[in-house]
Image: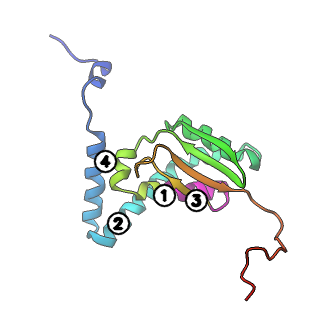
Amino acid sequence: MFALTDCGRDAFDQAYDKLAEDALRWIAQSAGGGELGEAAVAAFARARMAAQAEGYRTALESVAPEERTEALARALTADGYAATARSAPVGEQLCQHHCPVAHVAEQFPQLCEAETEVFSRLLGTHVQRLATIAHGDGVCTTFIPKKTTTASTSTAGRNPA
């Protein structure tokens, strides 16, 4: 007599995280477990992020280089990451205040590692992940150093030997 609507179905518990964890665990085990399994999960994570990155790349190509971190934050927000960008003394910080895959990334950090690699490629510089929600931090934070166009002739901080 009655049928649930999509809205009604959404009110029930979901098992998407469990399904994703099971799938990634299966990938790892099917590849032989151990280092081979970890490599297979990493390959999946990279492929997943590469597909996501295409949309981000388009967003970044349409802005000036100094606006790319902010453009990446907007693109991530559109994908549910609630991201912000802010200036830091020697660069910028990209903060993701939500992570749609945090529960799965707790078990499979390769997801975070692949994301960091994509950020580095998209922004054209080395980036450093400072914190992740999956690791228990409140926010995923990525540091993007300022690009310098000239080499420093200063020897400050260098080993004189």
On the rendered image, what quadrant is the C terminus found in? bottom right
Check disc 3 and give the amino acid type.
Gln
The amino acid sitting under disc 1 is Ala
Counting from the top left corner in percent of width and height, residue 130 is at 54, 55
**Residue depicted at 80% across the width and 77% down the height:** 155
Task: Name the mark on residue 128.
Answer: 3
Percent coordinates x, y for residue 103 in the rendering: 35, 45
Q: Which residues are magenta?
A: 115-126
Give percent across and percent down for residue 24: 31, 55
In-image side of 143 versus 61 (left or right): left
| Residue at point 26%, 45% (across, down) | 18
Q: Position of residue 137 (x, y in %)?
A: 45, 47
Is 42 magenta? The answer is no
State the CA–CA distance, disc 4 to disc 1: 16 Å
Residue where numbered disc 2 is placed = 38
Q: Vertically, is 129 above or below 12? A: below
Element type at marker 1?
A: helix
Question: What element does badge 3 sit on?
Answer: strand
Residue at mark 2 to residue at mark 3: CA–CA distance = 22 Å
Give the residue type at disc 4: Ala
- Which circle, 3 or 4, is nearer the viewer? 3
**Dot label at residue 55:** none
Residue behind mark 4: 20
Measure the C-alpha gap from mark 1 to mark 3. Answer: 12 Å
The amino acid type found where label 2 is placed reads Glu
